[in-house]
Image (tube, rainbow, N blue to C red):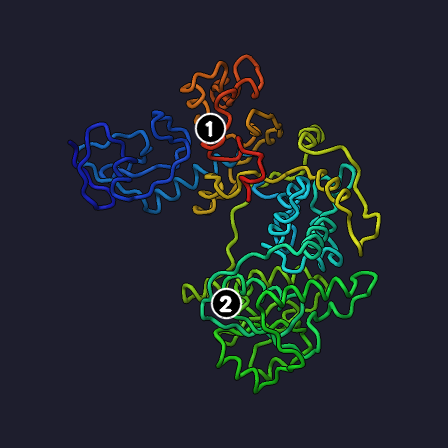
Amino acid sequence: MVKLRINNQPIEVAEGTTLLEAARQLQIAIPTMCHMEGSGHFTSCMVCLVKDVSNGRLMASCSMPAMEGMEIITDDEECRESRKASLELLLSEHVGDCEAPCQLVCPAHMNIPLMNRLIAAGDFQKAIEVVKRDIALPAILGRICPAPCEAGCRRKSIDGAVSICLLKGFAADEELEQDFVPATPKAPSGKKVAIVGAGPAGLAAAFYLNRFGHQTVIFDKNGEAGGELLHLDEALLPATIRKKEIDRFIKSGVALQLNKEVDAALFEQLKADYDAVVLAVGAQALDWTQLGLTTSKTGIEVDKSTYQTSAEHVFAIGNALRPSKLAVRSVGQGKELAFILNEYFEKGKVSAYPERFNSKFGKLQENEIQEYLKESVELERQEAGRGKAVGFTRDEAVAEAKRCLHCDCRNPESCQLRNLANDFGAVQKRFQYSERLPVRKEFAPQGIVYEAAKCIKCGICVRLTQQHQEEFGFSFIGRGFDVKVGVPFSESVEKALTKTALLVAEHCPTGALSKTEIEEQL
C-alpha cells in the first residue's frame, strides 16, 4: 500500500493506483477527456494535470501512479491555467459550431436547427415544444419578426436562407389548430411577481415565470393585452391569430388586470406586495423619475447583465429600456429575466443570465457546401403559397424544413470539450495560427455522423474499435503534428464501424462522432 496526500487529505491506496483514481476515492473531481475506464492510459488531452508539491512539476493524473509520501495539489491557479492552455490547444484544431449561426444571431437564441429537424420529420408537437423553450409568442412572431436569424443562415449564400420565421409560425399555428397539450408548469413556488405592461416583453416574462411555478399578475392600462401588437396592420398580423395566441397564453395560469394604470402609489404597493416587480411598458408610458428610478437617454437605466433597476427587486425589460420595433428582442429579454428571477428566488442572489462557450469556425468554403448538402435537399427556398399572414401548408413546411443544413453540433449539451472550455474560460483562437481543417461529413451505421475536423485525437474510438475487433476500425495515421484519426487503407467510416458505431459515439468527448436521431437531442 502507498500513503500520500491530495489537497491536504491523507489517503492510502494500492500500488499501481493512478493519481486520478486516488483523487476520485477522495471525491476530488479532476477533469478528463482522453481517459476511459478499462482501456489503459493514453495521456493525450492533458486536461487532468495535477502538481507535485515537492518539485512543482505538473503531471497527467490519469497515467501517473501514486507514490509513497507524495503531496499532490489538484486545484490551484497553476493547475487551472495549465488545463485552460491544454483546452485552448485542443480548440485550436477543433472545427465545429456548438450552435448554428442562425441560433447565435436570434435575439431569443432559439434552437432553430432542432425545430427544423422535427418539422421535417412531421413531429409538429415536439417542434413547438422546442420553439417555446425560447419564444413565448411564436404564432405572432412568425409573422412580424424581420428574421435576423435568416441573415445568419449559411444557406443564404447558396440558394436562399431557410424560411425560419415561417416555419416557427407554422409550428405555432399547428399548436393553435390541434390544441396540443401545453407543458406542465413546476409546482407553485409561493413567489409572486407583478409585471407592468402586457406587450411582448411582459407576456414573455409571465409565460416563463409561470413555467417555473411563480405566480404572475400583469397590469396594463389598455382594455386588451398585446401592447404595440394591437396597432399592427391586419395584413401583417391577423387579429384572430393575435387574440387566439394571447388567449391561450392567459389561460395557462397568468393573471391579467386590464384598464389598470400604474401610478406612483400603486407602484409602491406592488413593491410591498410582490417578491419582484417587472416594468415592461414603453419608455414614454410613465415618468420613471417620479417612481424613484434612475433613467438614461432612452428609458430606465438597468444593470445590463441582470435587468435590475436602481430600485431593489425592480427590473425592467423591452421598450422600458429603449424604444424598439424588434418584438423578438423583447421576448428574448422576458425569457432571460424569468430565468434570472427564478435563480434569485432559489438562491437569494441576483446573477447574470449565463452565457456558454461557443465554438465557431465562420463561413463555409466552396468545397464544403456539398458536405452540408449531404444532410439536406437541393431545393430552392419555399414561399408560403397562401401568403405570409396565413403561413405554410404542412407540405410546404416539411419541404422547407428539409433545406436546413444542420450546421449545429448534435452533441451540444454533453460535449466535454465545450463544457470544460466553459468552466475554464478557454479562448478558442489563442493558438490558431494556420488555416483550419476542411469540414467533411461521413456516415456510419446506427445513425452516426463522423466529422473528422472536430476530432481532438483522444484515441477513445481507436481503443474501442480495437477492443471490439472491428475489421478496420479507427487508428492513428501519420506522425508528429500531422497525425490524425482515420480508417486504415483509406476505407470508409461505414466499414470501420460495423459493430461499434453507437458505442464510439456515446464515448466521443466532442461532437466528432454523434447520433443524428432527433430523440437524442430533445
Residue carrying label 1? 503
Give the crowd class for mark 2: few <14, some 14-19, many >=20 residues within 10 Å.
many
- The part of the image, by quadrant, that contains residue 408 is top right
Q: Is residue 320 above or below residue 475?
A: below
Q: Pinpoint residue 250: horizontal percent, then vertical percent.
A: 63, 68
Rendered residue at 58%/73% (across/down): 255
Residue carrying label 2? 214
Q: Is residue 72 above or below residue 294?
A: above
Q: Quadrant of the C terminus?
A: top right
What label does residue 482 carry, if any? none
Task: Please state which of residues 403 and 355 is positioned toward the viewer in this rendering.
Answer: 403
Q: Is residue 367 above or below residue 275?
A: above
- The part of the image, by quadrant, that contains residue 405 is top right
Q: Quadrant of the N terminus?
A: top left
Residue 476 as seen in the image, left or right of residue 99: left
Q: Pinpoint residue 516: horizontal percent, then vertical percent.
A: 58, 34
Task: Please state which of residues 335 and 356 is positioned toward the viewer in this rendering.
Answer: 335
Find the distance from the CA under tag 1 to the CA under tag 2: 42 Å
Q: Pinpoint residue 86: horizontal percent, then vertical percent.
A: 43, 36
- Residue type pointed to by label 2: His
User: Is any part of residue 451 visible from this angle?
Assistant: no
Assign a secondary structure to mark 1.
Answer: helix
- The part of the image, by quadrant, that contains residue 38 is top left
Residues marked 1 and 2 touching at CB (< 8 Å)? no
Rendered residue at 48%/60% (across/down): 186
Assign a secondary structure to mark 2.
Answer: loop
Rendered residue at 76%/64% (across/down): 240
